[in-house]
């Protein structure tokens, strides 16, 4: 991951194609990500409830007709906001679900058009994957996303340079993996979230009922530890920063 390697990085053996667990580095606040928060989605509590900081809840690969509505309901019921990394083709097929995600006060990020292994593609193909998704999200929402998550966490200099050209200010990886993609149970997803610390980002997916079921317990666990779901923004050199909503 070259220049985006964190201060406290560690590698663990896992699914082929999945990235090492990456720790977010706190940096100067820069550009904001897309948001259109309704009055009912203002975080999980007053600032005093967030005494131990903020974490980034992220959900990849949506929108999904099977889980997006329930996932949004679970987050809103807990007064929480999260970042959804949108799969372009799926958003094109389900425009109303994309609109519902924005209307629910969630933040939107680019997750490419077809979810490919970007590091195996040439420059033109990478450009197309990112730019087509940027165009769709901009046309659908009226704003240009500034967050990007490469599928499988696979990135290189070419990918980052093209992302910058498309207005991306943060390449958002993660340092806690829920492993919902690997069949983790709801209890296992909740356990993974229990390791979150201030500034951490957890990888989850919009597509698994086990993840939807875990959300209320995750929010309750964060609250009991003085942590709140936060907003991910751009820092230095595409590094993400988690801050107050």
Image: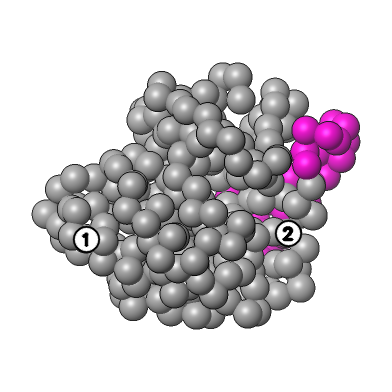
- The answer to whether residue 37 of the structure is visible from this angle is no
- The answer to whether residue 187 of the structure is visible from this angle is yes
Query: In the rendered view, does 128 fall on the left or right side of 162?
Result: right
**Residue 1 horizontal/vertical position (percent):** 61, 25
Query: How many numbered marks are there?
Result: 2
Number of the label disc, if any, that sits on residue 223: 1
Q: Quadrant of residue 155?
A: top right
Question: Helix or strand or loop: what does disc 1 sit on?
Answer: helix
> Would you call the spot at circle 2 few (<14 residues within 10 Å), some (14-19), or many (20 or more)?
many
**Residue 186 horizontal/vertical position (percent):** 45, 68
118 drawn magenta: yes
Name the residue tied to disc 2.
88
* Picture colour scheme: one colour
Q: Which residues are magenta?
A: 117-145
**Residue 6 horizontal/vertical position (percent):** 46, 25
Above-or-below relation of 218 to 132: below
Front residue of this view, candidates 79 and 245 = 79
**Residue 104 horizontal/vertical position (percent):** 45, 72
Which residue is at 78% across, 33% downward?
A: 119
**Mark nearer the N terminus (2 vs 1):** 2
222 drawn magenta: no
Front residue of this view, candidates 140 and 22 = 22
Which residue is at 40% across, 53% downward?
A: 192
């Amino acid at each position: 991951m070259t220049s985006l390697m964190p201060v406290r990085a560690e590698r663990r053996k896992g699914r082929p194609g999945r990235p090492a667990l990456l720790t977010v580095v706190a940096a100067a606040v820069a550009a904001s990500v897309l948001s259109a928060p309704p009055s009912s989605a203002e975080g999980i509590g007053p600032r005093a409830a967030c005494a131990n900081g903020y974490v980034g809840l992220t959900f990849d690969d949506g929108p999904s007709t099977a889980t997006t509505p329930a996932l949004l309901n679970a987050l809103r019921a807990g007064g929480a906001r999260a970042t959804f990394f949108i799969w372009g083709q799926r958003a094109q097929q389900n425009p109303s679900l994309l609109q519902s995600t924005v209307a629910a006060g969630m933040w939107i990020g680019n997750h490419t058009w077809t979810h490919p292994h970007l590091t195996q593609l040439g420059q033109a193909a990478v450009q197309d994957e990112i730019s087509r998704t940027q165009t769709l999200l901009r046309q659908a929402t009226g704003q240009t996303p500034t967050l990007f998550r490469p599928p499988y966490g696979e990135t290189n200099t070419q990918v980052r340079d093209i992302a910058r050209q498309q207005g991306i200010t943060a390449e958002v990886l993660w340092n806690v993996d829920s492993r919902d993609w690997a069949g983790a149970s709801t209890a296992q997803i909740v356990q993974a979230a229990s390791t979150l610390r201030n500034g951490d980002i957890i990888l989850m997916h919009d597509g698994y009922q086990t993840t939807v079921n875990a959300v209320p317990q995750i929010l309750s666990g964060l609250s009991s530890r003085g942590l709140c779901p936060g907003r991910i923004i751009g820092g230095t050199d595409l590094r993400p920063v988690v801050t107050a909503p």
